[in-house]
Image (spheres, grey):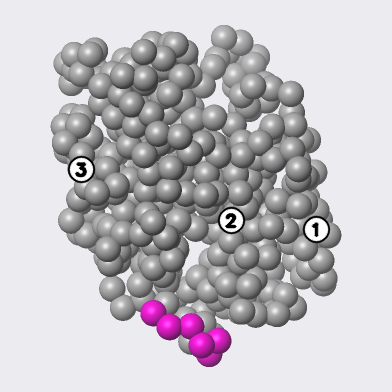
Amino acid sequence: MASGIRDKVAIVGMGCAKFGERWDAGAEALMAEAFEEALCDAAIEKTSIQAAWLATAFEQYNVGKSGIPLATALRLRGISVTRVENYCASGTEAFRGAVYAVASGACDIALALGVEKLKDTGFGGLPPNAIGLLAHEAMPNYSAPGNFAQLAGAYAAKYSVDPGVLKRAIGHVSVKSHANGTKNPKAHLRNPVTLEQVLAAPIVAEPLGVFDCCGVSDGAACAIVTTPDIARGLGKKDLVTVKAIQLCTSDGSEAYGSHWDGSSFETTRVAAKRAYDEAGIQCPRDELSMLEVHDCFSITELVTMEDLQISPRGGAIADVLNGFFDGDGRLPCQIDGGLKCFGHPIGASGIRMIYEGYLQLTGRAGPRQLADPALCLTHNLGGAPFLNVAAVSIIGHECR
Protein backbone atom coordinates (compact mmCIF):
# COMPACT_ATOMS: atom_id res chain seq x y z
CA MET A 1 0.00 0.00 0.00
CA ALA A 2 1.23 3.49 -0.81
CA SER A 3 2.80 5.23 2.17
CA GLY A 4 3.46 8.69 0.70
CA ILE A 5 6.70 10.64 0.35
CA ARG A 6 7.03 12.16 3.81
CA ASP A 7 10.71 12.93 4.56
CA LYS A 8 11.92 10.83 1.61
CA VAL A 9 13.14 13.88 -0.34
CA ALA A 10 15.23 16.87 0.76
CA ILE A 11 15.55 20.26 -0.90
CA VAL A 12 19.25 21.08 -1.21
CA GLY A 13 19.13 24.21 -3.34
CA MET A 14 16.66 26.81 -4.52
CA GLY A 15 16.80 29.97 -6.59
CA CYS A 16 14.45 32.69 -7.77
CA ALA A 17 14.85 35.36 -10.43
CA LYS A 18 13.72 38.91 -9.79
CA PHE A 19 10.06 39.06 -10.81
CA GLY A 20 8.70 42.03 -12.72
CA GLU A 21 8.71 43.67 -16.13
CA ARG A 22 11.93 41.99 -17.20
CA TRP A 23 12.46 43.67 -20.55
CA ASP A 24 16.17 43.07 -19.95
CA ALA A 25 15.90 39.26 -20.05
CA GLY A 26 14.37 36.54 -22.16
CA ALA A 27 13.00 33.29 -20.78
CA GLU A 28 16.42 31.64 -21.12
CA ALA A 29 18.11 34.39 -19.06
CA LEU A 30 15.42 34.13 -16.36
CA MET A 31 15.92 30.36 -16.18
CA ALA A 32 19.67 30.82 -15.85
CA GLU A 33 19.23 33.46 -13.12
CA ALA A 34 17.12 31.13 -10.96
CA PHE A 35 19.25 28.08 -11.72
CA GLU A 36 22.56 29.72 -10.87
CA GLU A 37 21.29 30.66 -7.41
CA ALA A 38 19.94 27.16 -6.83
CA LEU A 39 23.13 25.46 -8.02
CA CYS A 40 25.28 27.67 -5.80
CA ASP A 41 22.99 26.98 -2.86
CA ALA A 42 23.13 23.23 -3.44
CA ALA A 43 26.94 23.34 -3.75
CA ILE A 44 26.98 20.58 -6.37
CA GLU A 45 28.32 20.25 -9.88
CA LYS A 46 25.79 20.71 -12.67
CA THR A 47 26.70 17.25 -13.94
CA SER A 48 25.25 15.74 -10.73
CA ILE A 49 21.70 16.54 -11.90
CA GLN A 50 20.20 13.44 -13.48
CA ALA A 51 16.73 14.61 -14.56
CA ALA A 52 14.81 17.87 -14.87
CA TRP A 53 11.25 19.14 -15.15
CA LEU A 54 10.27 22.44 -16.77
CA ALA A 55 6.96 24.21 -16.09
CA THR A 56 5.60 26.84 -18.46
CA ALA A 57 2.00 27.51 -19.45
CA PHE A 58 2.22 29.56 -22.64
CA GLU A 59 4.78 27.80 -24.78
CA GLN A 60 4.06 29.99 -27.80
CA TYR A 61 5.27 33.05 -25.88
CA ASN A 62 8.03 31.38 -23.91
CA VAL A 63 10.09 28.32 -24.64
CA GLY A 64 8.22 25.99 -26.99
CA LYS A 65 6.45 22.69 -26.45
CA SER A 66 9.29 20.54 -25.08
CA GLY A 67 11.94 20.49 -22.38
CA ILE A 68 14.70 21.21 -24.88
CA PRO A 69 14.89 24.96 -24.12
CA LEU A 70 15.70 24.19 -20.47
CA ALA A 71 18.43 21.76 -21.49
CA THR A 72 19.95 24.26 -23.91
CA ALA A 73 19.63 27.32 -21.66
CA LEU A 74 21.31 25.55 -18.73
CA ARG A 75 23.52 23.21 -20.80
CA LEU A 76 22.12 20.11 -19.12
CA ARG A 77 23.83 17.55 -21.28
CA GLY A 78 22.60 14.01 -21.71
CA ILE A 79 19.74 13.99 -19.17
CA SER A 80 15.96 13.70 -19.48
CA VAL A 81 14.09 17.00 -19.43
CA THR A 82 10.30 16.98 -19.34
CA ARG A 83 8.04 19.97 -19.90
CA VAL A 84 4.80 19.99 -17.87
CA GLU A 85 1.78 22.28 -17.85
CA ASN A 86 -1.21 22.21 -15.51
CA TYR A 87 -2.68 25.70 -15.71
CA CYS A 88 -1.57 27.88 -12.79
CA ALA A 89 -0.46 24.79 -10.84
CA SER A 90 2.27 24.11 -13.41
CA GLY A 91 5.13 25.07 -11.08
CA THR A 92 4.02 22.64 -8.40
CA GLU A 93 3.55 20.00 -11.09
CA ALA A 94 7.22 20.34 -12.09
CA PHE A 95 8.28 20.16 -8.45
CA ARG A 96 6.15 17.05 -7.98
CA GLY A 97 7.83 15.39 -10.96
CA ALA A 98 11.32 16.00 -9.57
CA VAL A 99 10.35 14.97 -6.04
CA TYR A 100 8.61 11.78 -7.15
CA ALA A 101 11.61 10.82 -9.30
CA VAL A 102 13.89 11.00 -6.27
CA ALA A 103 11.39 9.38 -3.90
CA SER A 104 10.96 6.44 -6.29
CA GLY A 105 14.68 5.86 -6.60
CA ALA A 106 14.65 6.67 -10.32
CA CYS A 107 17.39 9.27 -9.82
CA ASP A 108 19.50 10.70 -7.02
CA ILE A 109 19.35 14.41 -7.80
CA ALA A 110 16.61 16.14 -9.80
CA LEU A 111 15.75 19.67 -10.86
CA ALA A 112 12.43 21.51 -11.14
CA LEU A 113 12.21 24.91 -12.80
CA GLY A 114 9.26 27.11 -13.69
CA VAL A 115 9.38 30.13 -15.97
CA GLU A 116 7.01 32.48 -17.76
CA LYS A 117 7.69 35.55 -19.90
CA LEU A 118 4.34 37.30 -20.13
CA LYS A 119 5.15 41.00 -20.37
CA ASP A 120 6.27 40.56 -23.99
CA THR A 121 2.96 39.12 -25.19
CA GLY A 122 1.30 42.48 -25.82
CA PHE A 123 -1.61 41.74 -23.48
CA GLY A 124 -2.36 43.61 -20.28
CA GLY A 125 -3.45 40.37 -18.63
CA LEU A 126 -3.05 36.75 -19.62
CA PRO A 127 -3.09 35.93 -23.34
CA PRO A 128 -6.62 35.29 -24.67
CA ASN A 129 -6.18 31.52 -24.94
CA ALA A 130 -5.56 31.24 -21.20
CA ILE A 131 -7.92 28.30 -20.73
CA GLY A 132 -8.54 27.44 -24.33
CA LEU A 133 -11.86 26.34 -25.76
CA LEU A 134 -13.60 26.45 -22.40
CA ALA A 135 -13.29 30.21 -22.26
CA HIS A 136 -13.30 31.42 -25.81
CA GLU A 137 -15.71 29.19 -27.69
CA ALA A 138 -18.01 27.62 -25.14
CA MET A 139 -17.93 30.76 -22.96
CA PRO A 140 -17.03 33.80 -25.10
CA ASN A 141 -17.76 36.26 -22.28
CA TYR A 142 -15.46 34.51 -19.82
CA SER A 143 -13.01 36.60 -17.81
CA ALA A 144 -10.97 35.65 -14.77
CA PRO A 145 -12.01 38.72 -12.71
CA GLY A 146 -15.65 38.10 -13.59
CA ASN A 147 -15.58 34.49 -12.50
CA PHE A 148 -13.77 35.15 -9.24
CA ALA A 149 -16.16 38.02 -8.55
CA GLN A 150 -18.93 35.43 -8.75
CA LEU A 151 -17.02 33.42 -6.14
CA ALA A 152 -17.19 36.47 -3.88
CA GLY A 153 -20.92 36.85 -4.50
CA ALA A 154 -21.63 33.21 -3.78
CA TYR A 155 -19.58 33.30 -0.58
CA ALA A 156 -21.36 36.45 0.63
CA ALA A 157 -24.76 34.96 -0.13
CA LYS A 158 -24.04 31.66 1.60
CA TYR A 159 -22.86 33.27 4.84
CA SER A 160 -25.05 36.41 4.71
CA VAL A 161 -22.02 38.68 4.67
CA ASP A 162 -22.62 42.41 4.48
CA PRO A 163 -21.07 43.73 1.21
CA GLY A 164 -19.15 46.42 3.09
CA VAL A 165 -17.68 43.90 5.51
CA LEU A 166 -16.64 41.63 2.63
CA LYS A 167 -14.92 44.49 0.82
CA ARG A 168 -13.02 45.49 3.96
CA ALA A 169 -11.92 41.89 4.50
CA ILE A 170 -10.63 41.31 1.00
CA GLY A 171 -9.12 44.80 1.11
CA HIS A 172 -7.21 43.81 4.24
CA VAL A 173 -5.86 40.78 2.37
CA SER A 174 -4.31 43.10 -0.21
CA VAL A 175 -3.02 45.60 2.36
CA LYS A 176 -1.36 42.79 4.31
CA SER A 177 0.35 41.32 1.24
CA HIS A 178 1.63 44.71 0.06
CA ALA A 179 3.06 45.38 3.52
CA ASN A 180 4.93 42.08 3.33
CA GLY A 181 6.09 42.72 -0.22
CA THR A 182 7.88 45.92 0.77
CA LYS A 183 10.47 43.72 2.49
CA ASN A 184 11.18 41.52 -0.51
CA PRO A 185 13.71 42.73 -3.09
CA LYS A 186 12.61 40.09 -5.62
CA ALA A 187 8.94 41.16 -5.66
CA HIS A 188 7.49 43.04 -8.63
CA LEU A 189 5.42 45.51 -6.58
CA ARG A 190 7.01 46.83 -3.38
CA ASN A 191 4.90 49.82 -2.36
CA PRO A 192 2.58 49.68 0.68
CA VAL A 193 -1.07 50.52 0.21
CA THR A 194 -3.74 51.63 2.66
CA LEU A 195 -7.20 50.19 3.09
CA GLU A 196 -8.59 53.54 1.96
CA GLN A 197 -6.64 53.26 -1.30
CA VAL A 198 -7.85 49.72 -1.88
CA LEU A 199 -11.51 50.57 -1.24
CA ALA A 200 -11.34 53.68 -3.46
CA ALA A 201 -9.66 51.93 -6.39
CA PRO A 202 -11.52 51.43 -9.70
CA ILE A 203 -13.74 48.36 -9.83
CA VAL A 204 -12.68 45.58 -12.20
CA ALA A 205 -15.57 43.19 -11.44
CA GLU A 206 -17.71 43.95 -8.39
CA PRO A 207 -16.61 43.60 -5.62
CA LEU A 208 -13.05 43.23 -6.93
CA GLY A 209 -11.10 46.42 -7.46
CA VAL A 210 -7.70 46.98 -9.01
CA PHE A 211 -5.87 46.11 -5.78
CA ASP A 212 -7.83 42.86 -5.44
CA CYS A 213 -6.32 41.43 -8.63
CA CYS A 214 -2.77 40.14 -9.01
CA GLY A 215 -0.78 41.42 -11.94
CA VAL A 216 1.13 39.81 -14.78
CA SER A 217 4.92 39.59 -14.60
CA ASP A 218 7.98 37.75 -15.83
CA GLY A 219 9.87 35.38 -13.56
CA ALA A 220 11.50 32.02 -12.90
CA ALA A 221 12.11 29.83 -9.85
CA CYS A 222 14.12 26.65 -9.38
CA ALA A 223 14.52 23.74 -6.92
CA ILE A 224 17.12 20.98 -6.65
CA VAL A 225 16.07 17.89 -4.67
CA THR A 226 17.74 14.69 -3.53
CA THR A 227 17.50 12.04 -0.82
CA PRO A 228 18.17 12.99 2.82
CA ASP A 229 21.16 10.65 2.92
CA ILE A 230 22.76 12.28 -0.11
CA ALA A 231 21.97 15.73 1.29
CA ARG A 232 23.77 14.87 4.52
CA GLY A 233 26.66 13.51 2.49
CA LEU A 234 26.89 16.94 0.85
CA GLY A 235 27.31 18.47 4.29
CA LYS A 236 23.76 19.80 4.60
CA LYS A 237 22.42 20.14 8.13
CA ASP A 238 18.93 20.70 9.53
CA LEU A 239 17.44 19.44 6.28
CA VAL A 240 14.31 20.86 4.70
CA THR A 241 12.30 17.87 3.54
CA VAL A 242 9.11 17.40 1.58
CA LYS A 243 6.29 16.28 3.84
CA ALA A 244 3.56 15.99 1.21
CA ILE A 245 2.49 16.93 -2.32
CA GLN A 246 -1.10 16.39 -3.40
CA LEU A 247 -3.07 17.45 -6.49
CA CYS A 248 -6.81 17.26 -7.12
CA THR A 249 -8.44 17.99 -10.47
CA SER A 250 -12.06 18.88 -11.19
CA ASP A 251 -14.08 16.19 -12.92
CA GLY A 252 -16.55 18.69 -14.34
CA SER A 253 -19.24 18.19 -11.73
CA GLU A 254 -18.85 21.73 -10.35
CA ALA A 255 -19.60 23.18 -13.79
CA TYR A 256 -22.25 20.70 -14.89
CA GLY A 257 -23.79 19.38 -11.69
CA SER A 258 -26.03 20.95 -9.06
CA HIS A 259 -24.22 20.15 -5.80
CA TRP A 260 -21.65 22.99 -5.89
CA ASP A 261 -22.82 26.36 -4.59
CA GLY A 262 -19.94 28.40 -6.04
CA SER A 263 -18.59 29.60 -2.66
CA SER A 264 -15.50 27.40 -2.30
CA PHE A 265 -13.03 25.11 -4.09
CA GLU A 266 -13.73 21.42 -3.72
CA THR A 267 -10.36 20.52 -5.23
CA THR A 268 -8.49 22.51 -2.58
CA ARG A 269 -10.39 20.78 0.21
CA VAL A 270 -9.57 17.35 -1.17
CA ALA A 271 -5.91 18.09 -1.90
CA ALA A 272 -5.42 19.66 1.53
CA LYS A 273 -7.00 16.72 3.35
CA ARG A 274 -4.75 14.28 1.51
CA ALA A 275 -1.67 16.42 2.13
CA TYR A 276 -2.38 16.64 5.87
CA ASP A 277 -2.81 12.88 6.03
CA GLU A 278 0.45 12.34 4.15
CA ALA A 279 2.34 14.81 6.36
CA GLY A 280 0.81 13.56 9.61
CA ILE A 281 -0.85 16.90 10.39
CA GLN A 282 -4.00 16.72 12.52
CA CYS A 283 -4.69 20.39 13.28
CA PRO A 284 -3.30 22.59 10.50
CA ARG A 285 -4.37 25.83 12.21
CA ASP A 286 -2.09 25.02 15.14
CA GLU A 287 0.67 23.01 13.47
CA LEU A 288 1.51 25.05 10.36
CA SER A 289 3.96 27.96 10.66
CA MET A 290 3.23 29.86 7.43
CA LEU A 291 1.17 29.77 4.26
CA GLU A 292 1.83 30.70 0.64
CA VAL A 293 -1.48 30.41 -1.21
CA HIS A 294 -2.80 31.19 -4.65
CA ASP A 295 -3.99 34.78 -4.22
CA CYS A 296 -4.78 35.47 -7.88
CA PHE A 297 -7.61 37.56 -6.40
CA SER A 298 -8.02 38.65 -2.80
CA ILE A 299 -11.29 36.74 -2.46
CA THR A 300 -9.47 33.56 -3.50
CA GLU A 301 -7.09 33.83 -0.57
CA LEU A 302 -9.94 34.43 1.87
CA VAL A 303 -11.97 31.45 0.66
CA THR A 304 -8.86 29.25 0.55
CA MET A 305 -8.33 29.75 4.28
CA GLU A 306 -11.52 27.79 4.85
CA ASP A 307 -10.83 25.17 2.18
CA LEU A 308 -7.46 24.51 3.83
CA GLN A 309 -9.25 23.95 7.16
CA ILE A 310 -7.43 26.88 8.76
CA SER A 311 -10.54 28.97 9.36
CA PRO A 312 -13.96 27.50 10.12
CA ARG A 313 -16.65 27.73 7.46
CA GLY A 314 -17.78 31.35 7.29
CA GLY A 315 -15.04 32.33 9.74
CA ALA A 316 -12.25 33.50 7.41
CA ILE A 317 -13.49 37.09 7.41
CA ALA A 318 -13.10 37.34 11.18
CA ASP A 319 -9.63 35.78 11.05
CA VAL A 320 -8.54 38.14 8.28
CA LEU A 321 -9.85 41.27 9.99
CA ASN A 322 -8.34 40.18 13.33
CA GLY A 323 -4.88 39.97 11.74
CA PHE A 324 -4.52 36.20 12.14
CA PHE A 325 -2.78 35.96 8.73
CA ASP A 326 -0.78 39.19 8.94
CA GLY A 327 3.01 39.20 8.91
CA ASP A 328 3.03 39.47 12.69
CA GLY A 329 -0.06 37.32 13.14
CA ARG A 330 -0.43 33.77 14.41
CA LEU A 331 -0.19 32.18 10.93
CA PRO A 332 1.44 34.52 8.39
CA CYS A 333 0.12 34.19 4.86
CA GLN A 334 2.04 35.56 1.84
CA ILE A 335 4.94 36.70 4.01
CA ASP A 336 6.87 37.34 0.78
CA GLY A 337 4.05 39.41 -0.77
CA GLY A 338 2.33 36.60 -2.64
CA LEU A 339 1.03 36.75 -6.20
CA LYS A 340 -0.31 40.16 -5.29
CA CYS A 341 3.22 41.60 -5.14
CA PHE A 342 5.15 39.15 -7.32
CA GLY A 343 2.61 39.00 -10.11
CA HIS A 344 1.84 35.65 -11.66
CA PRO A 345 4.25 34.25 -14.27
CA ILE A 346 2.24 31.04 -14.42
CA GLY A 347 4.95 28.38 -14.65
CA ALA A 348 7.09 29.98 -11.94
CA SER A 349 4.57 30.79 -9.19
CA GLY A 350 4.30 27.36 -7.52
CA ILE A 351 8.06 26.99 -7.14
CA ARG A 352 8.39 30.64 -6.06
CA MET A 353 6.05 29.86 -3.15
CA ILE A 354 8.18 26.88 -2.13
CA TYR A 355 11.28 29.08 -2.40
CA GLU A 356 9.91 31.42 0.26
CA GLY A 357 9.12 28.51 2.58
CA TYR A 358 12.62 27.15 2.03
CA LEU A 359 14.20 30.54 2.86
CA GLN A 360 12.12 30.83 6.02
CA LEU A 361 12.93 27.31 7.16
CA THR A 362 16.65 27.86 6.62
CA GLY A 363 16.59 31.25 8.37
CA ARG A 364 17.55 33.24 5.28
CA ALA A 365 14.51 35.42 4.66
CA GLY A 366 16.13 38.63 5.82
CA PRO A 367 13.88 41.37 7.23
CA ARG A 368 10.75 39.26 6.80
CA GLN A 369 12.20 36.23 8.65
CA LEU A 370 9.72 34.50 10.94
CA ALA A 371 10.66 33.18 14.36
CA ASP A 372 11.45 29.45 14.26
CA PRO A 373 9.08 28.25 11.50
CA ALA A 374 8.63 24.48 11.34
CA LEU A 375 6.13 23.71 8.57
CA CYS A 376 5.24 25.63 5.41
CA LEU A 377 2.19 24.95 3.23
CA THR A 378 1.96 26.15 -0.36
CA HIS A 379 -1.17 26.12 -2.48
CA ASN A 380 -1.66 26.54 -6.23
CA LEU A 381 -4.97 26.83 -8.04
CA GLY A 382 -5.26 26.57 -11.81
CA GLY A 383 -8.29 27.24 -13.97
CA ALA A 384 -11.61 28.77 -12.94
CA PRO A 385 -13.65 28.36 -9.74
CA PHE A 386 -15.98 25.97 -11.53
CA LEU A 387 -13.29 23.86 -13.22
CA ASN A 388 -9.79 23.73 -11.79
CA VAL A 389 -6.79 21.89 -10.44
CA ALA A 390 -5.53 22.48 -6.90
CA ALA A 391 -2.06 21.59 -5.61
CA VAL A 392 -0.97 21.54 -1.97
CA SER A 393 2.65 21.04 -0.88
CA ILE A 394 4.05 20.91 2.65
CA ILE A 395 7.74 21.25 3.49
CA GLY A 396 9.46 21.41 6.85
CA HIS A 397 12.45 20.46 8.98
CA GLU A 398 13.30 16.78 8.74
CA CYS A 399 13.01 16.22 12.49
CA ARG A 400 9.56 17.79 12.88
Secondary structure of the residue carrying tag 2 is: strand
Image-based side of 214 in relation to 98, left or right? left
Q: Which residue is mark 1?
A: 73
Up/down of 64 relative to 287, above or below: above
Residue range of the region highlighted in magenta in the rendering: 233-238
Q: Earlier in the sequence, mark 3 or mark 2?
A: 2
How many numbered discs sit on the rendered protein?
A: 3
> Could you tell me which residue is drawn at 82 percent across and 72 percent down?
78
The quadrant of the picture occupied by the N terminus is bottom left
Farthest-out residue, bottom: 233
Q: Quadrant of the C terminus?
A: bottom left
The residue tagged with tag 1: helix, strand or loop?
A: helix
Q: Which residue does the numbered mark 3 point to in the structure image?
A: 324
Q: Which residue is mark 2?
A: 16
Q: In the image, 42: left or right of 72? A: left
Q: Nearer the viewer, residue 337 or 305?
A: 337
User: In the image, residue 154 lies at what x, y percent?
Assistant: 30, 17
Identified by mark 1, the residue type is Ala
Most foreground residue, 177 or 2: 177
